């Protein structure tokens, strides 16, 4: 046999093993994330039905209502944050796996939480601060990564600050709608408490001066 | 053919291809995306893997040609061009005079108008003949004049900073008779007394480049350098191709390509020939600019060999492979330095916004668990490819890998791609600038 072809076949065999290894690594990460996004979705379903139940049987803005919303808005938010940093790290390590559907599911979950938070702030008295954060991953955006790290620091300092990272490059129709709502076009951009729009990379000190930082979430009784 | 005429013929497919690579590089540089580097890395690792498999298979499949036991040894002259190399010349001559050979051989030093105490050192070696040039005319010119003078069957060209193993002639000379038309035999060039870290890195590099690589290349008629430190030439071949090119940055590569184009073969013998190498980064940089400019120039000069059917394995595989290799190195420049600039920009931003810099590109810690980047699998492939060449090479000269080689090897794996791609790109621009001037 021609030695060039022979070497080609052996190389192909080795590369097959190499790619299979890569695929296994990528796949194991994706299945971990899939399991977690499933449990996040399940919680989301539960909350939605709870909310619906409350609307049907007790539509007055009682403390029970506020607690239901708070559960959605703040507790699930923390789990989502954990999931998101895992997602980002795993996607960075990824070579062959497809992260499209995972990211879409997460994004929708996040938008829902943002809506709950907005409602919580409108209907109940709370110290929660919501931060909408628009970013993109393709093409890469170094400023976005830095903004993300800054938000991470702020989130750790102020547990009452809830961050909703919305990827503008995911094909989700809701995101352009929200962007238009606040007149945001650039990335990275921040919208704090649905009224302060920051259209460029914002440093930690400025952020801390805008948000009112608290060491825990408090739901004030009416 | 004069230097000027060679330059005029440069407008050709290969230069066009290089221009395309440069354009692609500029395009990539402007629209740089770190994702490209992943795809590029996979491509490079896969090509490296193919070449390694090809080499290992060739090495196993080709019958080992044992050098014949010679009844009559050919006559040998040793030519040592020397220009202001008083520091190393004494040690070089001692080593050369100790070479074992059944016949007496003459040693000539071509003193190329040295202005240091070369003459004093030469006085100590009574048996050495000296051919003194009144002015500095260059290595190739001096050698060409001597080639016309000597009458021996073989001519050994030795650099004045090289200290050959005593058995080099006994091992190399019989290789002239393993097949027809052998024009030159090249040995295993190694690094003499590596002291500085830069030299120890080069030691590792020379092991993997001049050992197993050259051995298999020779089996496939694919040697494209007749190393300056020491090469044994057949005088007939040197006369037939009219000696060295007197106006070439790497005349040792040029002469190998010209031997091929005249139908001569190059053979290899795995005998150590230690040579001095640059001790500092700056010295290494200057040496490499000269090498790589020479490589680019000679690739273009011998473009006719590209897939030439008259040359078997050399034209079909090695010459195109070399051209592909050079093009890939130029692309690496964009990918590697693009990544570095992107990293520096991000690092700068992180500093500016007083964030802690934590980058583990291949291993990432996620909540006390860590995850390994899939790209690491290809890094393992690349390191394995390098190790195959390194291990085969050092076993050829019965050296065991020592702990002191580990750090230079580790650093060179990461440092060489950076350095070579950088220096190659600079060399390309220097060469293009020089060509333009003469057009």
Image (cartoon, helix red, strand yellow):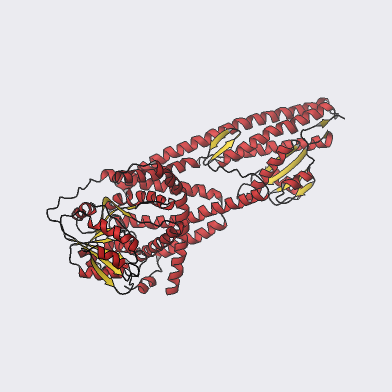
Evaluate whether residue A199 shows in this view: yes
Question: A125 above or below B127?
Answer: above
Farthest right residue in view: A222
Quarter of the image with the C terminus of chain B is bottom left
Q: Nearer the viewer, residue B268 or A67?
A: B268
Name which residue lies at 73% across and 43% down: A132
Q: Nearer the viewer, residue A155 or A166?
A: A155
Against B170, residue A133 (above or below) is above
The outermost residue toward the left is B71
State whether residue A46 is above or below residue B422.
above
Q: Which residue is painted at 75% across and 45% down in the image?
A: A207
Q: How many marks?
A: 0
Question: Residue A181, how many percent across, how many down?
Answer: 76, 47
Give left or right: position of B276 versus A42. left
In the image: residue B23, left or right of residue B301: right
x, y percentage for residue B92?
29, 58
- Asked if residue B159 shows in the view, the reply is no
Q: Quadrant of residue B77?
A: bottom left
Q: Who is closer to the viewer here, B393 or B379?
A: B393
**Residue A171: horizontal and vertical position, in percent?**
64, 44
Farthest-out residue, top: A57
Q: The N terminus of chain B appears in which quarter of the rendering? A: bottom left
| Residue at image coords 32%, 56% | B316
Q: Position of residue A61 (x, y in %)?
A: 85, 30
């Amino acid at each position: 046999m021609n030695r060039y072809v022979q070497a080609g076949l052996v190389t192909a065999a080795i590369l097959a093993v190499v790619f299979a290894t890569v695929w296994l690594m990528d796949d194991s990460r994706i299945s971990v994330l899939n399991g977690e996004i499933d449990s996040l979705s399940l919680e989301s379903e539960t909350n939605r039905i709870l909310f619906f139940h409350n609307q049907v049987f007790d539509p007055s803005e009682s403390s029970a209502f506020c607690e239901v919303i708070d559960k959605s808005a703040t507790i699930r938010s923390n789990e989502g944050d954990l999931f998101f940093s895992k997602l980002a790290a795993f996607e960075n390590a990824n070579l062959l796996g497809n992260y499209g559907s995972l990211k879409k599911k997460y994004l929708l979950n996040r938008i829902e939480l943002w809506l709950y938070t907005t409602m919580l702030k409108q209907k109940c008295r709370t110290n929660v601060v919501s931060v909408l954060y628009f970013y993109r991953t393709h093409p890469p955006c170094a400023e976005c990564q830095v903004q993300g790290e800054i938000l991470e620091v702020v989130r750790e300092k102020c547990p009452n600050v809830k961050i909703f990272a919305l990827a503008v490059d995911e094909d989700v129709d809701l995101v352009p709608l929200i962007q238009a709502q606040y007149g945001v076009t650039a990335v990275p951009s921040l919208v704090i408490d649905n009224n302060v729009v920051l259209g460029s990379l914002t440093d930690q000190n400025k952020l801390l001066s805008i948000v009112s930082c608290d060491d825990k979430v408090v739901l004030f009784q009416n | 053919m004069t230097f000027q005429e060679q330059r005029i013929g440069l407008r050709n497919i290969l230069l066009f291809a290089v221009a395309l690579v440069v354009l692609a590089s500029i395009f990539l540089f402007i629209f740089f995306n770190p994702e490209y580097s992943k795809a590029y890395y996979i491509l490079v690792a896969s090509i490296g893997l193919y070449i390694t498999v090809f080499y290992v298979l060739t090495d196993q499949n080709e019958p080992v040609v044992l050098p014949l036991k010679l009844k009559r040894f050919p006559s040998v002259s040793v030519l040592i061009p020397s220009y202001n190399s008083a520091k190393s010349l004494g040690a070089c001559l001692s080593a050369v005079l100790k070479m074992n050979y059944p016949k007496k051989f003459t040693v000539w030093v071509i003193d190329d108008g040295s202005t240091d105490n070369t003459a004093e050192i030469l006085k100590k070696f009574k048996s050495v003949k000296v051919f003194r040039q009144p002015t500095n005319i260059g290595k190739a010119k001096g050698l060409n004049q001597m080639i016309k003078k000597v009458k021996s069957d073989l001519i050994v060209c030795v650099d004045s900073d090289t200290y050959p193993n005593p058995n080099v002639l006994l091992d190399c000379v019989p290789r002239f008779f393993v097949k027809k038309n052998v024009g030159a035999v090249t040995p295993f060039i190694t690094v003499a007394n590596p002291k500085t870290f830069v030299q120890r890195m080069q030691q590792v590099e020379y092991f993997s480049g001049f050992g197993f690589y050259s051995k298999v290349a020779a089996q496939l008629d694919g040697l494209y350098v007749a190393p300056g430190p020491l090469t044994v030439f057949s005088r007939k071949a040197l006369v037939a191709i009219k000696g060295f090119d007197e106006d070439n940055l790497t005349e040792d590569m040029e002469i190998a390509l010209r031997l091929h184009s005249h139908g001569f073969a190059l053979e290899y013998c795995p005998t150590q020939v230690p040579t001095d190498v640059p001790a500092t980064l700056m010295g290494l940089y200057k040496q490499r600019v000269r090498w790589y400019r020479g490589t680019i120039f000679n690739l273009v000069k011998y473009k006719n060999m590209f897939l030439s059917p008259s040359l078997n394995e050399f034209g079909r595989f090695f010459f195109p492979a070399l051209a592909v290799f050079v093009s890939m190195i130029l692309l690496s420049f964009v990918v590697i330095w693009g990544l570095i600039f992107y990293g520096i920009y991000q690092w700068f931003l992180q500093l500016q916004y007083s964030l802690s810099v934590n980058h583990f590109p291949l291993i990432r810690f996620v909540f006390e668990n860590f995850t390994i980047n899939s790209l690491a699998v290809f890094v393992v492939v690349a390191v394995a490819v390098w190790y195959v060449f390194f291990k085969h090479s050092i076993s050829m000269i019965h050296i065991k890998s020592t702990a002191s080689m580990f750090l230079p090897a580790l650093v060179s794996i990461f440092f060489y791609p950076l350095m070579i791609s950088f220096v190659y790109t600079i060399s390309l621009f220097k060469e293009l600038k020089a060509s333009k001037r003469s057009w």
